[in-house]
Amino acid sequence: MTFGGRLHQVRKAAGLSQEQLGDLVGMSRQAVSKWETDQAAPDVETLARLCGALGVSADALLGREAPAREKAGSASLEDCVRRNAAKRCFTAGWITVLAGVALLVAELFSLIAIQFADAQVHQSWRTNALDYAQDGPMPLIFGVTIAVIAAGALLAAGGLLAMGGKRPMKNRKRP
């Protein structure tokens, strides 16, 4: 993999846009784009700022083997990618849960609409709107919605376990 490919992968794993990375190292988005497409390369001072902003060693970014002793605080490229994937799973899981709950609430309100429609069409209606949940496709619809909520919760729990039980932190700019 080229330097540009590694830079792109690490930047994405860190959850940064080209513009955000450019701001962190004092360069333009266009400069970051040229580095990632191997049309240009950063100078040594900018490379050091890139490593600091992305939390990786220059060896990892340049594709060289790391020295026998790594710094205690520096994360490898694989750790950065793994941590970002876990964070994305956690976020996707809870978004899925929230969307499922919103659908469930909408489905419950639709039962009231079905109740009123039944009253107008048949001139009679059931007194409990939840009785309509047993008719037609409603059990299947409720089942699918509950499955979506459960899948989202499992995805979020898996992401949380992959992060070692620590809540994800928001991206913050480094000086």
Image: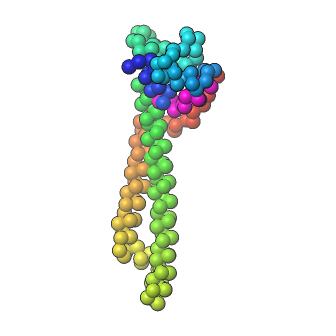
The C terminus lies in quadrant: top right
Q: Residue at x 51, y 32 (%)?
A: 15
Q: Is residue 81 left or right of residue 32?
A: left
Q: Position of residue 57 (x, y in %)?
A: 49, 16
Instruction: Tell me which segment is drawn in magenta.
Output: 13-24
The one nearer the camera, 137 or 165, is: 137
Residue 50 occupies which quadrant of the picture?
Answer: top right
Q: Is residue 35 above or below residue 115?
A: above
Residue at the spot x=48%, y=30% of the render? Answer: 12
| Number of on-image labels | 0
Question: Considering only vertical position in the picture, is 41 above or below 36?
Answer: above
Q: Is residue 137 above or below residue 67?
A: below
Q: Confirm whether residue 54 shows in the render.
A: no
Q: Residue at x 50, y 81 (%)?
A: 116
Q: Position of residue 146 (x, y in %)?
A: 40, 59
Q: From this viewpoint, which residue is outermost toward the bottom?
A: 123
One can see residue 78 in this view: yes
State whether residue 159 is above or below residue 129: above
Magenta stretch: includes residue 46? no
Q: Position of residue 86 (x, y in %)?
A: 44, 36
Q: Name the main secondary structure of what is drawn in magenta.
A: helix
Question: Which corner quadrant holds the N terminus?
Answer: top left
Residue 52: % across, % down: 56, 19
Please state if 74 lies on the left or on the right of 140 as rendered: right
